[in-house]
Image (tube, helix red, strand yellow):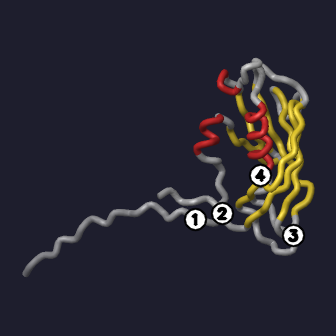
Amino acid sequence: MTEKRSRPVRELPPEPDPFAPTQAHGPFQELVGYEILHNERGPYFRLPLRRDHINPHGVVHGGVLMTLLDAAGGRCLVGLTVPGRGEAILSSVTASLTSEFMIAVRTGTLYATATPDHIGKMLAYVNIRVSLDAIDGPLVARGVATFRIYTRSLVKPPA
C-alpha cells in the first residue's frame, strides 16, 4: 500500500474586488502626504504642510491646493447613490475644476471638505473648500468641480 502525501494547502489572498471603492488614492497621495479621514459629515482631507509644499515665494504652491480640491471633490462622491438607479458611485474622474485662492499660507495644516450640489446619471457637481488649521478654519481656497461618475471602480489591480 502506497501512501499518498498531500501537499499542504496554501490559502491564497482574496481576489481584489474591482467594484469596491478605494479609501486610498495611491502613490500620489503618499507623495503629497494628505490623509483621508472621516467624521459625521463624511470624508475630509488633512495635510500638514512641509517645506516641499512651498513655492519659491515662500507660500503653499497652487498645485498643492488644486490637488486637495480635486481629490476631496471626487472622494466625497464615493458611496453615494446615483438617483433613479440606486447604484453606488465607486469612482469618479474630474471633468472640470474651477478654483479661487483666498489667502497665502506659509505654515500650518490644510483641511479639505467637499459637498455634492447635484448628482445626475453621469455627472456630479461639487463645491470644495480648503481651510487652515481646522475644518471650519480660515478659507484658503475654494473650488467648483464637475465629475464623471462611475458605478464600477476604475482602479486597476496591481500587475
- Point out residue 115 in the picture as x, y percentages from the top left corner: 87, 49
- Point out residue 33 in the picture as x, y percentages from the top left corner: 64, 34
At label 4, the amino acid type is: Gly
Question: Residue placed at 12% from the left, 76% from the top?
Answer: 3
- Please, what secondary structure does the residue beneath circle 2 have? loop
At label 2, the amino acid type is: Ser
Q: Is residue 73 above or below residue 5?
A: above
Location of residue 124 (image quadrant) = bottom right
Pointer 2: residues within 10 angstroms few (<14), some, or many (20+)?
A: some
Of the residues under marks 3 and 1, which one precedes in the sequence? 1
Of the residues under marks 2 and 1, which one precedes in the sequence? 1
- CA gap, disc 1 and disc 4: 20 Å
- CA gap, disc 4 and disc 3: 17 Å
Q: Give yes or no for contact between labels 3 and 1 (Cβ–Cβ under 8 Å).
A: no
- CA gap, disc 2 and disc 4: 13 Å
Question: Residue placed at 81% from the left, 65% from the top?
Answer: 81
Quadrant into which the N terminus falls: bottom left
Q: Give yes or no for contact between labels 2 and 4 (Cβ–Cβ under 8 Å).
A: no
Q: Give yes or no for contact between labels 2 and 3 (Cβ–Cβ under 8 Å).
A: no
Pointer 4: residues within 10 angstroms few (<14), some, or many (20+)?
A: many
Question: Residue placed at 74% from the left, 65% from the top?
Answer: 150
Of the residues under marks 2 and 4, which one precedes in the sequence? 4
Q: Where does label 2 land, which residue?
A: 153
At label 1, the amino acid type is: Asp
Is 143 situated left or right of 52 in this image?
right
Of the residues under marks 1 and 4, which one precedes in the sequence? 1
Q: Where does label 1 land, which residue?
A: 17
> Which residue is nearer to you in this view: 3 or 28?
28
Q: Where does label 3 land, which residue?
A: 83
